[in-house]
């Protein structure tokens, strides 16, 4: 079975309906349901829009960064909280976990 097919099977095996499943390599999450994908897309759109909004009214590069960094950290924190609440409990993982055959 190809790695992509195995990965898709891993994401679909989601009996608890998590929006985000554990990454198969490392620590963190990856979107598993449409709600997770929408959350991630909204985050990816909000960060550059926020930068553009701040940059339009800023008078210098440092002024832009001073306003942009805290807001981006806040947005990232909100994303992490949502992943924690709606996602599978994170843990370090290296590869697709083996299913226990009972």
Image: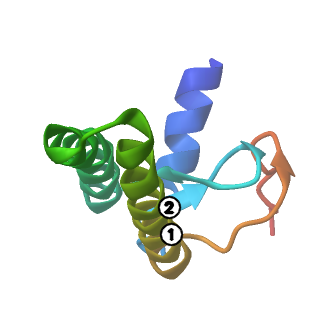
Disc 2 + disc 1, Cβ < 8 Å: yes
* Percent x, y of residue 5: 54, 27
Relative to 102, is 48 above or below? above
Q: Residue at x 43, y 72 (%)?
A: 78
What is the C-alpha distance between the residues marked 2 and 1?
6 Å
* Percent x, y of residue 53: 16, 46
Q: Secondary structure at mark 1?
A: helix
The quadrant of the image that shows the N terminus is: top right
- Closest to the observer: 36 or 16? 36
Q: Which residue is mark 2?
A: 73
Res. 67 visible in picture? yes
- Closest to the observer: 95 or 47? 47
Q: Residue furthest toward the bottom? A: 85
What is the tally of numbered marks visible in this picture?
A: 2
Residue density around tag 2, few if under 14, some if 14–19, many if 20 or more, within 10 Å: few
* Percent x, y of residue 60: 33, 36
Judge left or right: residue 54 versus residue 76: left
Judge left or right: residue 74 versus residue 26: left
Q: Residue at x 28, y 42 (%)?
A: 51
Relative to 15, is 23 above or below? above
- Number of the label disc, if any, that sits on residue 77: 1
Judge left or right: residue 100 versus residue 61: right
Q: Residue furthest toward the front? A: 59
Relative to 30, is 70 above or below? below
């Amino acid at each position: 079975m190809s790695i992509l097919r195995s990965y898709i099977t891993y994401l679909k095996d989601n009996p608890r309906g998590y929006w985000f499943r554990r990454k198969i390599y490392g620590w963190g999450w990856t979107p598993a349901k449409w709600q997770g994908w929408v959350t991630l897309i909204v985050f990816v759109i909000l960060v550059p829009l926020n930068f553009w909004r701040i940059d339009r009214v800023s008078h210098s590069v440092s002024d832009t960064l001073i306003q942009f960094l805290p807001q981006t950290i806040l947005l990232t924190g909100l994303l992490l909280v949502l992943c924690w609440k709606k996602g599978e409990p994170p843990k370090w993982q290296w590869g697709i976990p083996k299913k226990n055959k009972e």
